[in-house]
Image (cartoon, rainbow, N blue to C red):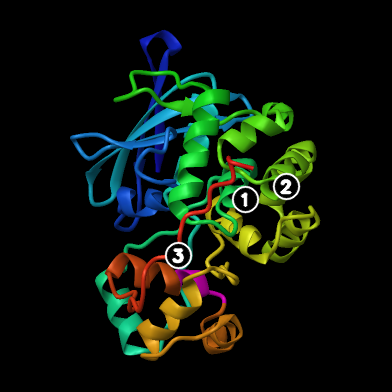
Amino acid sequence: MLTSVPESAGESVSTVFESDSPLDVAMTLSEHRRGKGDPTYERDAAGSVWRTSRMNSGPVTYRLTQISRTAVRCIAWGSGGVEFADTLPALLGSEDDASGFEPEHPTLQEAHRQFPHLRLGRTGLVMEALVPAILEQRVHGVSAFASWRMLVTKFGERAPGPTPRPMYITPEPAVWRRIPSWEYHRANVDPARSKTIVRCAQVAGRLEEAAAMPPAEAITRLRAVPGVGIWTAAEVAQRAFGDPDALSVGDYHLAAVVGWSLLGRPLDDDGMVDYMRPLAPHRFRAVRLLQVSGKAIKPKFGPRTPLVDHTWH
């Protein structure tokens, strides 16, 4: 159940979402955070989640506060507030269906028992998930998060509302398209990734349509853009579409994590895909359960690979 009430003569929209089952706002929204300094995401001292988005109707800042196990209060500011309120249930996982997920592995069974309230939400916003996923291609998360922070802060716009710190709205596709190559360079983004972002921005309208498509068709639409591979498309599907089966094949760590966590030995991508086939269509759900339950394991055997600096050449 969703109720929305305008406040302060239209300056904000207050929404309360009542779910039929338990919710965990912090757990559901954590997938959208791109590092501790993400200018589009914040947790305040009260535990509320603040986030910004760009809706069709304009920018929005929203604060989500869990008021009971099944209820969430949202206050949204900006011209996109009313539109966002309509998408709130899907963001919190109201469309997620875990029926049929019956893992046989004891580790997954225990994780599912501990976190039956895990919900996979969907934003319906493709570019919002696609650009940071491209930035994360083939580089350390630390570097990608720094690039995201620098680009959004410089080329985005200040978020509306009384944010707990300065927050920003991600740039419009037209802005991503016009960012000069040297600005991507300064943000430590190599030409391959920056060109992929520009190509996606050029067809952003077509890509946003993928949110309303069946999963397989949506992935095909995304991968039609050169530079958007299977890993990037899966990362978008997880966040924008709430796809419970979107497995991030090609991830630097994931296959090894799945192998060590469930088999006690590492796997490569082919081995992971083969091993997890019986879990379809809930393979991403299984991965998230490993993550949130703390049961994801990957032993450390040596020093971390060095960060790559693209700004010097």
Point out residue 265 in the picture as x, y percentages from the top left corner: 40, 90
Label 1 belongs to which residue? 134
**Magenta region, residue range:** 281-285
Label 2 belongs to which residue? 196
Circles 1 and 2, Cβ within 8 Å, touching? The answer is yes
Q: Nearer the viewer, mark 2 or mark 3?
A: 3
Tell me which amino acid carries mark 3: Thr
Whole-angstrom CA distance, mark 2 to mark 3, is 25 Å
The residue positioned 79% from the left and 40% from the top of the image is 203
The residue positioned 63% from the left and 37% from the top of the image is 185
Q: Secondary structure at mark 3?
A: loop
Other residues around mark 3 within 10 Å, as few (<14) / some (14–19) / many (≥20): few
* Disc ID at residue 305: 3
Q: Earlier in the sequence, mark 3 or mark 1?
A: 1
Other residues around mark 2 within 10 Å, as few (<14) / some (14–19) / many (≥20): some
Q: Left or right? Give the position of 268 relative to 15.
A: right
The residue positioned 40% from the left and 43% from the top of the image is 1
Q: Which residue is at the front of the view, 137 or 123?
A: 137
Residue located farthest toward the top when viewing the structure as drawn: 9
Tell me which amino acid carries mark 1: Ile
Point out residue 108 in the picture as x, y percentages from the top left corner: 35, 81
